[in-house]
Image (cartoon, rainbow, N blue to C red):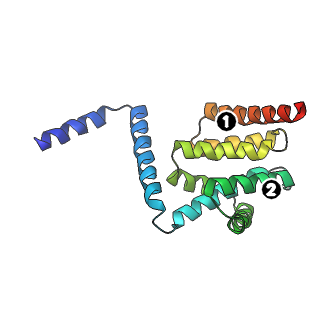
Amino acid sequence: MPCQLWADEARTAIRMTGTERSEATSMLKSLRNFIASLAGSARPQTSENRNCRLAIAALLTRVATVDSDMSQARREKLRALLQSYFGLDDPAVGQLIRDAAEAAGSAVDLYHFTRQLNDVLDDEGRQRAVKMMWQVVYVDGRANDLESNIIWRIADLLGVSSRQRIELRQLVAAGRTVRTSLVLNV
């Protein structure tokens, strides 16, 4: 009987469409990440976690400096996002930003960083990374063509669809507009 159950499961898996298979894989990856996060507090930081932190910070740094030096507002936003997302203290986030600037400056492409993130992040994590990029860009008011283009390329490499990327952009832009109008009305 156990062999029959296994055979039935195998036939079901074979009949899955590409989308169903992708959804099943995504669910398993999310479950794996959840279990790893539960166990994460009990184990030391792995090189995978450090690489993920560095990759996200490097991509955010690259986005923040794609058309010029990083403004003070962007530097503060970058610091706040990394501190909040990774739960780092001031010295640790400062070191991460320095390491990220060096890594982003010496990188010849974006693929190295996005590949690392694709290995460890689920769909939600990759979307969160793209959202943080929009947050860094919109802290100065609006996104220019260079900034929009690099975020589009990174989102594409991360497997974040155009629809999701645009929704995240609109969400961040709308949030900024609401905050600005609240400040002006006070």
Q: Which mark identifies residue 75? A: 2
Packing grade of label 1 (10 A; few <14, some 14-19, many >=20) is many
Asked which secondary structure carries label 1, the reply is helix
**Closest to the observer: 133 or 153?**
133
Q: Position of residue 65 (x, y in %)?
A: 80, 53
Q: Residue 185 bears which disc, if any?
A: none
Marks counted in the figure total 2
Q: In this orientation, does residue 71 appear? A: no
Horizontal side, residue 26 vs residue 130: left or right: left
Quadrant of image for the C terminus: top right
Q: Residue at x 64, y 55 (%)?
A: 56
Residue type beneath disc 2: Arg
Residue drawn at the location 13% of the way across and 43% of the way down: 2
Residue type at mark 1: give it: Leu
Q: Which residue is mark 1?
A: 168
User: What is the quadrant of the N terminus in the image?
Assistant: top left
180 on left or right of 31: right
Residue, x 58% and y 58% (percent of image)?
52
Quadrant housing residue 99: bottom right
- Where residue 83 appears, as percent x and y from the top left, is 68, 57
Quadrant for residue 69, please give it.
bottom right
Q: Is residue 75 above or below residue 92?
A: above
Q: Secondary structure at mark 2?
A: helix
For marks 2 and 1, give the CA distance.
21 Å
